[in-house]
Image: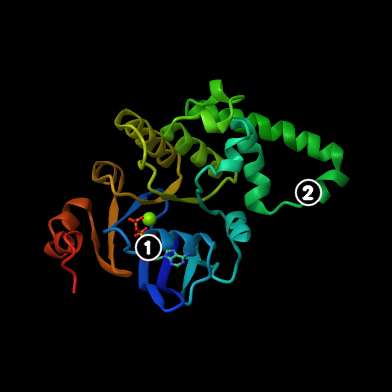
Amino acid sequence: MLHIENVGKSFGALTVLRGINLEAAAGRITGIIGPNGAGKSTLLNVVGGLFPNDTGRILLDGTDVTPLPMHERARCGLVRTFQISRELGELTVLENLMLARQAQTGEAVLGALLRPGSVAREERAAVLEAKGLLDNVGLWRLADQSARALSGGQKKLLELSRALMLKPKIILLDEPAAGVSPPMRLEISKVIRGLCQDGMTFVIVEHDMDMIASLCDQVYVMAEGKNLTSGTFGEVVADDRVVRAYLGGVA
Ligand SMILES: Nc1ncnc2c1ncn2[C@@H]1O[C@H](COP(=O)(O)OP(=O)(O)OP(=O)(O)O)[C@@H](O)[C@H]1O
Ligand SMILES: [Mg+2]
């Protein structure tokens, strides 16, 4: 579904991605691991369209999305989750989901104001959809609470639900287990696995190796902005080069 080919990215004089290649198969969970500073988050940012890449291309279902800005990639079904910012924290859980559609699809507010009838119908449909999504992740009873009051894990589930409002084909998740209690990590894994069984495709960057081992069919290891290796979790952790990369021994 997602084909990343020779993607490179520099910030000024600092080269962060040096020709990354990656394939994410439909209906599967593809993992990306690697030491701090390897470029994992930058890769998700570039693939999601937050920053342009300098080299290479990104194909979604065979279509080259490299020239598209973030909201158009989201419209094509390629969605990266974002942390609930301070501003979004002021909104309720339900409002966060309602806003996710406009914020990431770039839907014109003016157009909505000019078509009040159809907007009201769409809003009602969107509330029902949001309720279904929040029910699915166990957040519906918190729908009217401000997002700020959620636990770390609940915020991650809210970020995921915001992404799902866009009806994506593939979701890019950056460290869904970070800052989350161990029981909640299991809950998040369960939600991701359930969505995958319903046909969703994921790319997950994560330092929690238990989560990667339990969820991912294929794991890519990045180090110093490059592909180090890929394979099953068992294969990559048995690779000496991976161990050395984590110990800081990569030349
Ligand atoms: N917007 C930016 N401007 C300048 N440099 C950046 C930017 N984003 C990332 N970097 C740099 O790119 C390098 C890779 O960072 P990145 O966040 O992608 O690593 P990572 O693999 O996600 O690490 P971690 O596991 O710690 O999250 C770092 O040296 C970082 O400082
Ligand atoms: Mg990162």
Q: Is residue 107 above or below residue 195?
A: below
Q: How many marks?
A: 2
Can you tell which mark lies on residue 234? none
Residue 22 % position (x, y): 36, 65
Three-letter amino acid code at the position of disc 1: Glu
Q: Is residue 59 left or right of residue 179?
A: right
The secondary element bearing badge 2 is classed as helix
**Residue 99 lies in quadrant:** top right
In the image, is 95 to the left or to the right of 139? right
Instruction: Select label 2 or label 1 by which is in front.
Output: 2
User: Which image quadrant: the C terminus?
Assistant: bottom left
Would residue 80 be found to the left or right of residue 183 on screen?
A: right
Quickly name the residue at label 2: 109
Q: Secondary structure at mark 1?
A: strand
Percent across and percent down for residue 153 are: 41, 34
The reply to whether callout 2 and callout 1 are in contact (CB within 8 Å) is: no
Q: Is residue 133 visible?
A: no
Residue 85, how many percent across, how many down? Answer: 55, 44
Q: Amino acid at mark 2?
A: Val
Query: The N terminus appears in which quarter of the rendering?
Result: bottom left
Say few, some or many: other residues with alpha carbon within 10 Å of mark 1 (under 14 / 14 to 19 / 20 or more): some
Say above or below: 72 vs 151: below
Mark 1 highlights which residue?
Answer: 23
